[in-house]
Amino acid sequence: MTTLLKARQKIGKYNILGRIASGPLADVYRAYDTIHKMRVALKIPKSGDYNGHEEFLHEVQVATKLNHPNILPVLNASYIDDRFVIAMELGGESLANRIERRTSNARAIDLAAQALAALAHAHERKIIHCDIKPENFILFPGNRLKLADFGFAKISLRTIKASGSGTIDYIAPEQAMGRPKFQSDVFSLGLVLYRLFSGKLPEWPFAWPMLGHDRLLSRARPEFVAMLRKAIQLDPTKRYRNAMQMQAAFERSQSHARKQKRSGAKNGNRNGSSWRQLQWREFQRRYRKVLDTRHQCRRCEGPVAESMQACPWCGFGNPARGSESALSSTCPRCERGVKNDWDYCPWCYGPGFVVATSRRYPDKRYQSRCSKQRCRGPLIPFMRYCPWCRTKVRRPWKITGDKHACKACRWGVAKDFWNYCGWCREPVRRA
């Protein structure tokens, strides 16, 4: 059993920024490739025995057979310091996290199209994934979705010999009995898409109509619902033979929807930008540079800053968690960005850093100093704690160009826009 890596620890050419996830077989870390100057995800098996890495070797070998914009590529795989390390592109979050938040119909359709394209490409190459679930779809900037984790994948020749590997919530009945087919992936993806649109995960015996059916009908067109119903049939012979067939059915349903939309547009039924989008656009015009609101809330998708403790639009805690940081490292506790010369996280008071350097780096964002006389370390606006001595910042931070302040914490708020204080989650009361 290998020990966990800490933030700022080095392994080969990689600087560890923080841990993303920990499973029964492997840990996944966010890291910085010091040679290629890019952030990556590192998958490291928990077993220190070389003989226990066959599944991960298989994952690498299968992934190299696939080249598609919706399939997560393996950048590198090697043994480093007695660890088997797989380096992959670093995404923002998994589809499992994204499903928990509100998703517009247009975005859900786009995600469904990308998921189908990824699985269809694998099936065209005669590869059965065998573990289709939301956790194995990774989201990247620009709403790009990529299918990952081919550790259980099987290559179909004439017959398939396999165990019942997979995730029980999404596994097809025949796969659970050790007989995976292309139709098994179709079944699993049908459940993923059903949950994406209905917000519910159906359970055995999958008798139609299932849990969440009413919401599914309210969000999806009848042709799309019919496609899902066929994909989730218990009898594999009644499903689509593979993801290519399922993708074709999806495209037909969307082609019909586009024709109706064009017909409606000719009759004057055009939908403009929503009021909320217009509000966010005006807010960004006025405050993006001041507050560095380059991220989106994980729940409502409103513009937020990494330093915010709550979303000012919906009140969701740590709204930018998991987003790409402009700073060089990441706090392992709150996952916000930190600089390599800081001793503590200024956002959450979190310990656990491995000392990376004794050098001090200047930064144009420093605008104040710690109130502790022995420290007087420089501070970036909206820090909660001094990153040098851990002293709580007492001065109330203000928003440049705005005189309004939260009645609870006294920090600046954009009163004309916000529903909650982004620093303490206190509701903002507007006249």
Image: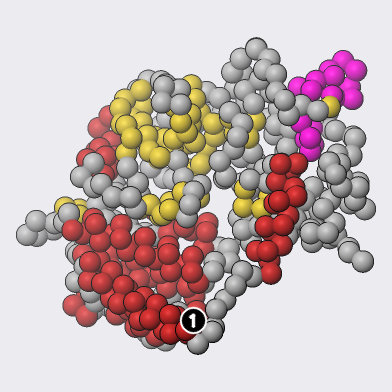
Q: Quadrant of residue 244?
A: bottom left
Pick whichever, 430 or 156, lies toward us: 430
Q: Is residue 82 above or below residue 424?
A: above
On the image, the x and y values in percent for residue 183 come to 23, 69
Direction from residue 12 to residue 410 in the image, left or right: right
Q: Which region of the structure is painted magenta?
A: 369-390
Q: Residue at x 34, y 53 (%)?
A: 70
Q: Is residue 110 visible?
A: yes
On the image, the x and y values in percent for residue 416 come to 83, 59
Q: Residue at x 75, y 50 (%)?
A: 286
Q: Is residue 5 visible?
A: no
On the image, the x and y values in percent for residue 99 come to 51, 63
**Secondary structure, magenta segment, majority class:** loop
Q: Secondary structure under badge 1?
A: helix
Magenta-span inclusion, residue 387: yes
Direction from residue 89 to residue 61 in the image, left or right: left
Q: Which residue is mark 1?
A: 265
Direction from residue 210 to residue 116 in the image, left or right: left
Chosen colour scheme: secondary structure
Pick whichever, 164 or 196, lies toward us: 196
The three-letter amino acid code for the residue at tag 1 is: Ala
Determine the residue located farthest toward the left in the rendered image.
Answer: 158
Q: Is residue 353 above or below residue 421?
A: above
Determine crowd level at label 1: few under 14, some 14-19, many 20+ residues with C-alpha closer than 10 A: few
Direction from residue 29 to residue 112 in the image, left or right: left
Q: Residue at x 25, y 61 (%)?
A: 120
Q: Is residue 335 above or below residue 233?
A: above
On the image, the x and y values in percent for residue 114 come to 37, 60
Q: Residue at x 48, y 29 (%)?
A: 32
